[in-house]
Image: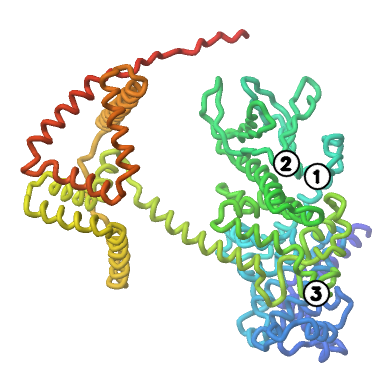
Amino acid sequence: MAVASKTRNMLENFVREGSFKWLLGNQSPYDEELEEMERSPSARTNWVPELSPIANIVVRRCSKILGVPTTELCEGFNSEASESIKHPSCYARNFLEYCCFRALALSTQVTGHLADKKFRRLTYDMMIAWEAPAAASQPLLNLDEDLSVGVEAFSRIAPAVPIIANVITSENIFKVLASSSDGRLQFFTYDKYLSGLERAIRKMRSQSESSLLSAMRSSKREKVLEVDGTVTTQPVLEHVGISTWPGRLILTDHALYFEALRVVSYDKAKRYDLSDDLKQIVKPELTGPWGTRLFDKAVFYKSVSLSEPAIIEFPELKGHTRRDYWLAIIREILYVHRFIYKYQIKGIKKDEALSKAVLGILRLQAIKEISSQTDLRYESLLMFNLCDQLPGGDLILETMADMSTFKELNRSSSSKPGGGMYSISALDMISNLGFSFGTSSSSSVEAGLAVGEITVGEVTLLEKAVKESKNNYEKVVLAQATVDGVKVEGIDTNFAVMKELLFPMMELWTCLLSLALWEDPLKSLLFCCVFTYIICRGWLSYAFALTLVFIAVFMVLTRYFSQGKSTHEVKVLAPPAMNTMEQLLAVQNAISQAEGIIQDGNIVLLKLRALLLSLFPQASERFAIALLVMALALAFLPVKYIVLYIFLETFTCYSPVRRSSTERWTRRLREWWFSIPAAPVILEREKEEKKKK
């Protein structure tokens, strides 16, 4: 009997929870709520005719959470919203956002709200309703189908709960979550993501409340964000100089700590500060046995407080995902403190900035746990990392720094968490999760930071800056794609491409050389007369300006006449294919030529040194006299005459009248140069002392 009773109760629970609804019909939970709303005595007053059925369902849920009837929500929106926000064309969506923001601000104050299935479903249904808010959009939405969410709805509703998303990174988070469902977010994936967030929060709370580095963290109330190296199969190695130690790596919201592992315990932790302005450098690094650079699995840390840099290695069999993850979160903490230092952010504003960085790392941990992508770009999911990469990212940070204080000047509703025209802030969000930063988190509401990054019916300055930056980034990506597409392999092939691209310049140089050598005396004489006249009249600057104008006009005309036509491709005659040995010989030949050029340059420098030090007195005297004559000319002659002299000397030296004398003086000058000895060079080798073991 006990077994039968237990089975009957289990079946009743399944039916009550809807697990057997596929046996009972195709009725969706939305249909049940609609029927319940119709049976309600206040159905007419609680139904907003401007809204679609799904939007009315969401507004009804918000009304229950707030304990306020729908009519009162409408009155509050009409009194708080401006006329532009209440325009009929956007009334439904803006009123929906108003109700959502008010309900979310109150719901997130409940401890453990992320673990509540009703809260998860509510936020997802808010996104669905946002896509079809008006009554006119009802035919576009079939409530009986398996619904999904688009990027615009996610980017609008999810940042209203700062733990779920951020204005700057919301699109990238959505792309990762919807990567396996054709660009639309399914509730199953969204639910997994929120479950991962809830686990990441519990993990951070347990780590911060543990005894890890308790003495070192207490002064700044640092929160432990990540720990690695505690599992023997995934060690962490620290390289400082020639020493290497395994140990435990700990990241807090202010610093990076490494505890070297001894026999049965950990050594005193080394602190690598990320919060002070110490000119830190954090970058990927190569490591290997005996100082070789083979494995791309390490993080390089350097600052002015260290005598020598530290290298933290994350060994793994293949890839470098561990290193990439740690590099991203270390840089996120470093960049947020650089942001704080650059804009002189203090007090509660500093706590708000740290909250955003911490929430970003929690989101990254949740995505890392549930995502199956192997090429996940961690830095694109962290806002300060992303601002460092995006074009105009500095403008995003500047806008974010200016947003903290101006909102409370003319808003009364934003001074309390229930204010519905604005979403809650990251600092309030993380305070509701049970964390606190500094000493000002408890007074965030009174200080005006209850206001978040989303405003009902408006695009904030931060959203505008992010949108403009991402548009520019798309242009950069497209341009980089063309760059990657034109890269060719092989020295000979690259040389052929370069030769073809420089063909116009080479033709111009050939023409000028022909004029200078007086191969066609009539053209050379005409060229010299024209430029002499231009220099004498002082029109040289106008000539250069006219050249730039000609180039600009050429570009405009080319664009006008080439509209609708395909881009002109550069046609290059590919050289004969070279095998590996021929390519190696070509490389060796190029290196030999480069070495010869460097040697000739060194000889010129050594001869000039000999002239300056009078190692050859007779040549040094002539050189000094020449320098003195040049100095007097520069001091007393107008620049116009100096330019005229240089031009005439250059372009008439090989004229029929001066050719013989030029060749004679060139020979004498070459003989004089060859007679100058080079300054001696002594190569000293550093004595390498053998290191004793």
Instruction: Tell which tag, 3 or 1, sits nearer the viewer.
Output: 3
* Mark 3 lies on residue: 411
Q: Are marks 3 and 1 in contact (CB under 8 Å)?
A: no
**Looking at the image, which residue is at 65% across and 68% down?**
461
Q: Earlier in the sequence, mark 2 or mark 3?
A: 2
Residue wearing tag 1: 223
Mark 2 or mark 1: name the one nearer the start of the chain: 1
User: Residue 306, image x and y in percent?
Assistant: 68, 29
Separation of marks 3 and 1 at Cα, in angstroms = 33 Å
Residue in front for this viewpoint, 568 or 344: 344
Instruction: Judge from the rendering whether residue 654 lies leftward or rightward of residue 183; answer left or right.
Output: left
Marks 2 and 1: CB-CB under 8 Å?
no
Query: What percent of the width, then of the height, locates residue 370?
Result: 67, 52
Q: Residue furthest right?
A: 1
Q: Residue at x 31, y 23 (%)?
A: 607
Q: Residues within 10 Å of mark 1 (few under 14, many from 20)?
A: many
Q: Which residue is mark 2?
A: 276
Q: Earlier in the sequence, mark 3 or mark 1?
A: 1
Real-space CA distance between mark 2 and mark 1, rounded to the nearest whole angstrom: 17 Å
Q: Amino acid at mark 3?
A: Arg
